[in-house]
Amino acid sequence: MMKRYAQMVLGVALSLAAAPSYAIGVRLPTNEATLNLNLQLQPQFLVNQAGSPDGMDPSYDVFVRRARIAVSGTVRKSFSYYFQLDNPNFGKFGNLTGRVLVQDAWIGWAPTGIDGGTVVYVDAGLLYLPISRHVLGYTTNYVTADLQTDAFRIPNSPFPSFRDVGVQVRGWALDKRVGFRGGVYEGYTPIDQPAGTCETGGAGCITPRRNPAVGGLINLDLIGSEEGLWLYSAYRWGTSPILSVNVAGNYQSRALKNAFGSLTDHKLLATGVYLDLPMTEQAELVFDGTLYLNRNGTGSPNTGTGFAASAGYRYGFIAPYVAYDYFQSSGCDAGSLTPSDLAVCSAGVDSANSRNFKAGVNLFFDKNLNHLNVELGITGCRPMGPRASRRRRRATCRPRSIPSPLEPRGGRSPTRWRTRHSSLCSCSGPSTSRAGEGAARRRTRAAAPGWRGLRLRLLPRQREGAGQSIDEPPGGPHCAPAAAASLHVGRQDPAARQHAAVCTGGEIGLEAFAAASAAPAAGARAKGTLSLREQVEAVERNLIGRTMTAVGGNQSEAARRLGLSRGSLIGRLKKYGPG
């Protein structure tokens, strides 16, 4: 049921932001240049169900989502420039550490001028990546309270707020009926890989040849026109309808590692549609939808299909809206993988799937200049995917709103990173983002600092659904976890009972767990009765047992060595039990 893995988020965001058209003009002693000053302040109040450190009560937070100062202008009708500073999420979860960063810094040259139906810029600097039209929107003019980022995946994203250093061509043509941008960007370029440090063939490194990333977007206006500005808007307050379709693509060679540690390409394809349908001067219907095809390597939980859509209806100064985000991994191809690779793939490939629903109302004051968003988000996570059994699906996710001491500067850490304030859950995966973790009430039998020295305790057989479950520490992945969390063993075969009898107090030590992991597989091999599925499970069980022993029970380290999220590892421990 949805309630088993739903996270409800009530976000109230007060946005007092100066839109570009309301910039303060600074008078200069020359007519050949302009200088504008933009200020944006966006305080936010956030309530998360079961978001308290113990995971039992709501959490409340007031912080500054965006605090921006931007300087922009033109020079001689041929150059444009834009420089912006931001201190994002200031005070979120009590973190008052300042982290002012350069959000945008670019200069653009238009050889034929900056005005007219056809304009071509050559931009260089810190630029927006052309991920999709939806991403290329003004932060003061979304349908929802913030950007929808859960449907596309940029694992371990090093790009602050989807910006990267590069050079691009941008502009519009055919009397502003076609918008375009595309270029070459730095992409994944780890700073800790100096020249000559990679092994022959690039083993141990990503982007061993430092191949850059490339990306581009085309926006075709079928009805009306929305071109002529740097970014796009949702509500337009006009009288002419606009219908546009868009397609975007991003690629970088050998920029990531797949589930088996091999280098792979990063590919992201997006296609979308935007509609603004004015009914009268006081009313308009807005729809924005994008389909994403994410390719981040075989077995990656961030390889899959995503969809994000939002619809709002503005009548006067009130605009109710609904939105939905979806991501489903591509799964594992059993026909092309060895049994051991299939086991590794199956262990975590569905750990970052998510379903997010949001509904809210936007209250406008002076159009987009000042407005108030009230938003409710319900986040459903399916950590093991639609192919998993009902019992395995009961594993819960945690709210992404539970931060690290400093949240990633970018957008979905799955991953996704995340700077969103509603629909904040996606399931735990090996990446940051963009991934988030989830949210239902949970209990632990015992709690003490740290996971080290974890022992697995047998509990009596219970009715399905009545047992306790191990999950990540209450309050989110960055809170202190429980040390002696209980493991519910749904069935106790003779091997399990034997190990329970040997261990003091009915506890199973790490050595016993490793031995029990190997015993069933060895017995089955002796009889020659192992099916393909049993072989896969035997390899996985044995590998997990030996790894847990090697790391002294540290689940985080074991998950890292196995290439899994900690939630996926816990799911495997629950599945195999001690025997």
Image: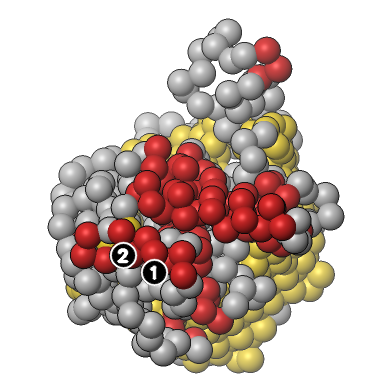
Graded by Cα atoms within 10 Å as few (under 14), some (14 to 19) or many (20 or more), the crowding at tag 1 reads: some
Does 41 appear above or below 323? above
Does 424 appear above or below 136? below
The x, y position of residue 159, in whole percent, is 50, 41
Q: Mark 1 falls on what kind of element?
A: helix
What residue would you read off at disc 1? 497
Tell whether 43 sits left or right of 28. Answer: left
Label tally: 2
Does 251 appear above or below 471? above
Most distant residue in the top direction: 196
Quarter holding residue 41: bottom left
Q: Mark 2 falls on what kind of element?
A: helix
Checking the image for residue 130, the label placed there is none
What residue would you read off at disc 2? 501
x 72%, y 70%: residue: 273
Tell me whether circle 2 and circle 1 mark residues in contact (CB < 8 Å): yes
Quarter holding residue 309: bottom right
